[in-house]
Amino acid sequence: MAPRKQLVLTGLFAILLGLTAVIVVDLLATIFFGLTVATVLIPIARWIQDRGLPRWWASVIATIVAFGGGVAVVIPIIVVLYIRRQQAVALLNSIPDQFTIEAFDLVYTIETADLTRIAVGYLREVALAIARGTPLLVAQAFVFAFVVFALFLRRESIARALMAPVPPDYHDIILRLYDRFRETLFALYIIQAATAAGTFLIAVTFFAVLGYQYPVTLGVAAGILQFLPVVGPSLLVLGVAALEVSAGAIGQAAIVLIFGLLLVAALPDAVIRPRLARETARLPASLYFVGFTGGLLSLGPVGVIAGPLAVALLSEVLVLLADEMNSS
């Protein structure tokens, strides 16, 4: 094909891609998540196919695995935010309006009433949004499943189509970026999800043993906070300990603080993450924090994945540029 014709077709593809993005803008986040999940789980589809099943059935089974994993993550959050929202509101309302801390003959007063009121209002708005958006969520779930299935079924042809406009001399760059893309997604999905699931189970058990009224709600909160870089579930532990201090239960607060930080906040990171970290790429905590925070603030929930992914790819391009400059 003549270079000029390739250029025209590439430009036409870019224009139609932009037009399609405008048309399906409400589904872009779902398509993005489907693309990233399929990228991570392609080895599963390949493994199933290697066991002797036809490609179509291997793709179906891998799609069911992906869909089931997504449901397993979303359902506990929906349970807390909608089905058990009254318990969550009651838990927030039990927080005192202020905390008083005395140290070195100084008294510090921390006002929490406004923050609690904002949190309760936000929780109720989210619950109403879930109720109103249930039909859209169902449609998005079907779109997610179809995107994942299509990527599993036609993965080689899609890869060839994407590589076709790229000159052969640049294929190594594309492959390097793809490797970083896949490894970063593995870190974001598999490691974070596994660590969050472990945190949830430990937190539910921990707060149930201590006799708290809503251990499942606290466990879901701990699991969600595991996705928050650096501080993570320690925020929940510190909050519960502060609540006990305000109620005068110093002994209970000490137990929550010591064993909570050890079991809920530290143990999952110490046990689960290192066992899976060998399978993933370089993703420093500082880069993850910048990408997570920036992506969440600019893009919303999709930014939790898109932000760290963009930062990781930028880091890889800088490494490629440095290698190229050193070799020239």
Image: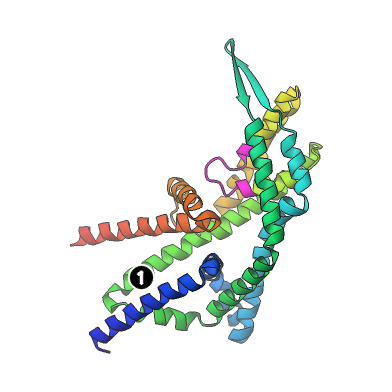
Amino acid carrying mark 1 in the image: Ile
- Left or right: where does residue 110 sit relative to residue 312? right
What residue sits 67% from the left and 50% below the top? 125
Looking at the rendered image, the quarter that the N terminus falls into is bottom left
- Residue 196 is situated, as x and y percent measured from the top left of the image, at 63, 51
| Front position in the image: 143 or 308 | 143
- Residue 174 is situated, as x and y percent measured from the top left of the image, at 36, 70
- Residue 86 is situated, as x and y percent measured from the top left of the image, at 78, 46
Question: Residue tagged by mark 1?
Answer: 174
Considering the numbered disc 1 on the image, is that residue within a helix, a strand or a loop?
Answer: helix
The answer to whether residue 29 is above or below residue 205 is below
Residue 262 seen in this snapshot: no
Looking at the rendered image, the quarter that the C terminus falls into is bottom left
Residue 185 magenta: no
Circle 1 crowding by C-alpha within 10 Å: few under 14, some 14–19, many from 20:
few
Give the magenta range.
224-237
- Residue 257 is situated, as x and y percent measured from the top left of the image, at 67, 31
